[in-house]
């Protein structure tokens, strides 16, 4: 499932390869991805517009076109958006294709077809922005800011970090890795954590996300494959029953908020 680093890599590649291109036409191949909007309205809005830029916020993508037209995309479980040399050729999993005046194309590929592509008004964009918390790598996201939001929450550390309204873009894999690095038990309520633990979580979030953004981006040469966690060196995620790489205790898996949490009962207290 694409997390912030993967969505960031998608945005960076699109900015490099599609900014300034003119859209000849848009074909929505899976109209359910725009619901409740109509595919025809998206196709009409895109025609003849120039792609100005591609912006990421949390796990959301905004494709900003000329004429004040903005497309809001969410990749969900298996989505990916990338440019192809010829818009006529794309896989069976293509759900929407922008044909560019240059002959190239932008393909929204999505095997499970849970992703979303919709037109976004200024109000829609504000609503998304308002629903999201700090960008983990934003310079303004300081330790003091992190401590102040952590102090207000009695949620377990894992659940708190997954909540996009506090810190945006973290998902199951990177939260597991960040808490492992911070040596913090994922079940501990945030507001009960000592300042030293909060400091370690903050440093780990920034460290993990910095490394992930760079490693995912550089490894992300092959369009169509999102291999998060295979690129980033995971140390605890999906390692249930295996020995901890630091203390050799057995890595445990527990359910939290409907998802699996992996942690080392020896290192994370
Ligand atoms: Zn351990």
Image (cartoon, rainbow, N blue to C red):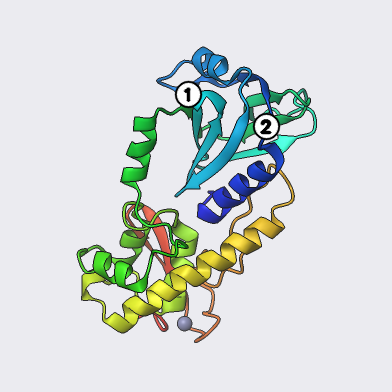
Image disc number at residue 180: none
- Answer yes or no: is residue 239 visible: no
Query: Cβ(mark 1) to ligand 1 < 8 Å?
Result: no
Question: What distance separates the C-alpha of mark 1 from that of mark 2?
Answer: 17 Å
Residue in the foreground of this view, choosing between 120 and 255: 120
- Answer yes or no: is residue 163 visible: yes
Residue in the foreground of this view, choosing between 20 and 36: 20
Q: Position of residue 154 (x, y in %)?
A: 20, 65
Could you tell me which residue is drawn at 53 percent across and 18 percent down? 45
Q: Residues within 10 Å of mark 1 (few under 14, many from 20)?
A: many
Q: Position of residue 232 (x, y in %)?
A: 61, 65
Q: Secondary structure at mark 1?
A: helix
Residue 153 in the image: above or below residue 41: below
Residue 221 in the image: above or below residue 20: below
Q: Position of residue 186 (x, y in %)?
A: 35, 69
Could you tell me which residue is drawn at 41 percent across and 63 percent down? 261
Q: Which residue is mark 2?
A: 106
The number of numbered badges drawn on the structure is 2
The quadrant of the picture occupied by the C terminus is bottom left
Could you tell me which residue is drawn at 51 percent across and 30 percent down? 71
| Residue 86 quadrant | top right
Q: Nearer the viewer, mark 1 or mark 2?
A: 2
Q: Secondary structure at mark 2?
A: strand
Residue farthest along the front direction in this orientation = 67
Query: Cβ(mark 2) to ligand 1 < 8 Å?
Result: no
Q: Which residue is mark 1?
A: 34
Query: Left of 38 or right of it: where is 224?
Result: right
Could you tell me which residue is drawn at 69 percent across and 31 percent down? 21
Of the numbered discs 1 and 2, the one sitting upstream in the chain is: 1
């Amino acid at each position: 499932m694409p997390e912030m680093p993967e969505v960031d890599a998608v945005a960076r590649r699109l900015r490099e390869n599609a900014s300034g291109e003119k859209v000849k036409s848009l074909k929505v191949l899976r109209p359910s991805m725009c619901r409740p909007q109509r595919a025809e309205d998206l196709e009409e809005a895109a025609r003849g517009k120039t792609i100005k830029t591609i912006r990421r916020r949390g796990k959301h993508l905004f494709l900003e076109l000329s004429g004040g037209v903005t497309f809001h995309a969410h990749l969900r479980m298996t989505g990916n958006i990338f440019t192809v040399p010829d818009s006529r050729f794309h896989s069976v999993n293509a759900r929407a294709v922008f044909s560019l005046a240059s002959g190239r194309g932008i393909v929204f590929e999505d095997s499970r077809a849970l992703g979303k592509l919709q037109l976004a008004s200024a109000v829609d964009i504000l609503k998304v922005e308002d629903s999201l918390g700090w960008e983990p790598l934003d310079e303004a996201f300081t330790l003091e800011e992190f401590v102040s939001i952590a102090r207000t929450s009695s949620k377990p550390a894992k659940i708190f970090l997954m909540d996009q309204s506090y810190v945006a873009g973290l998902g199951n894999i990177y939260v597991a890795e960040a808490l492992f690095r911070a040596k913090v038990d994922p079940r501990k309520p945030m507001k009960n954590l000592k300042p030293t633990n909060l400091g370690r979580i903050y440093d780990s979030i920034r460290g993990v996300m910095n490394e992930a953004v760079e490693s995912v981006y550089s490894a992300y040469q092959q369009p169509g494959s999102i291999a998060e966690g295979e690129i980033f060196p995971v140390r605890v995620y999906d390692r249930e029953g295996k020995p901890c790489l630091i203390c050799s205790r057995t890595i445990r898996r527990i359910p939290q908020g409907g998802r699996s949490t992996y942690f080392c009962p020896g290192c994370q207290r």
